[in-house]
Image (cartoon, helix red, strand yellow):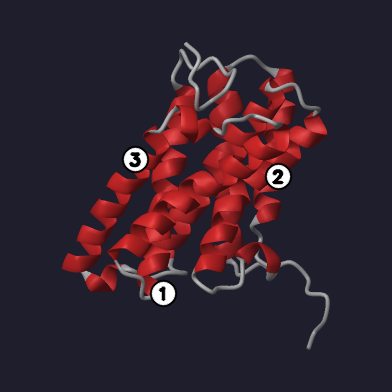
Amino acid sequence: MVSPLLGAIDTSSGAFLIVAIIGTIAFATSGVMAAAEAGMDWLGAAVLAVVVAIGGGTLRDLLIGNTPVAWIDDQWPVWVSLITAAVGIGVLRVRPDANPTRHAPYLLADAIGLGSFAVLGTSIALESGTSAFIAILMGVITGVGGGVIRDILTNTRPMVLVGQVYAVAALIGTLAYVALDAATSREEIIVWLPMAVVVAVRGLAIRFDLHLPRTSEN
């Protein structure tokens, strides 16, 4: 079975579709939490959830010429994002203290979204006929794109630009995906291991407060 969302990727095993759903829910969740922290209303939270969830993939599709972009042909990511936003808004209405952005729930959701979409973006680019190098770049863009848009819309400096081990985590995961794709045909390894690597690298960087060197100490 070929899904419009996943382009030419065979999703009969369900692995790639599961990754796409996980990533969509995770990034939409981070969007709702960021919207609440920024003082946005319900509409703003819903819009941010959708934009974060589809932003990276939209950039990727435009860059590799995969048009119309995936969610135009297959709208389920938009609906999943809206449902996630509704649930998130409901939780925050009942428990306003449940929105610790930059703390565990927010950072975990963001890391899972990053890992899911980095893997998915790399795979889609490879299946579209790009070189491994371009596929790696597309994986990173797919992973970080939504988060960058989220940070800009909430007037926050994008994590990818201020020393966070963010794009680097996505890069390590995309490199792992390309290497495993060439080494084995076992889909469960090709898909889940690189995703876990991204989440682990991001998690370790947060746990031990690791940052990239700054251009200036000022």
Secondary element under disc 2, as helix, strand or loop, is helix
Q: Residue 75: where, in percent of width, then height?
A: 40, 33
Residue at image position (61%, 52%) is 144
Circle 2: residue type: Ile
The secondary element bearing badge 1 is classed as loop
Dot 3 alpha-carbon crowd within 10 angstroms: few under 14, some 14 to 19, many 20 or more: some
Q: Which residue is mark 3?
A: 80
**Picture quadrant of residue 46:** bottom left
Numbered badge on residue 172: 2
Relative horizontal placement of residue 215, taking residue 60 as reference (left or right): right
Q: Position of residue 212 (x, y in %)?
A: 74, 66
User: How many angstroms separate mark 3 from mark 1 (CA)?
Assistant: 22 Å
Label 2, label 3: how far apart the Cα atoms are: 28 Å
Give the mark nearest the N terminus, 3 or 1: 1
Q: Residue at image x 34%, y 40%?
A: 80
Disc 1 + disc 2, Cβ < 8 Å: no
Q: Residues within 10 Å of mark 1 (few under 14, many from 20)?
A: some
Q: Is residue 55 above or below residue 126?
A: below
Please state which amino acid type lies under the numbered disc 1. Answer: Ala
Front-most of residues 63 and 194: 63
**Residue placed furthest toward the bottom:** 218
Rendering coords of residue 16 (x, y %): 50, 26
Q: Are marks 2 and 3 in contact (CB under 8 Å)?
A: no
State the residue position of label 1.
38
**Looking at the image, residue 140 lies above or below residue 218:** above
Tell whether 101 sits left or right of 156: left
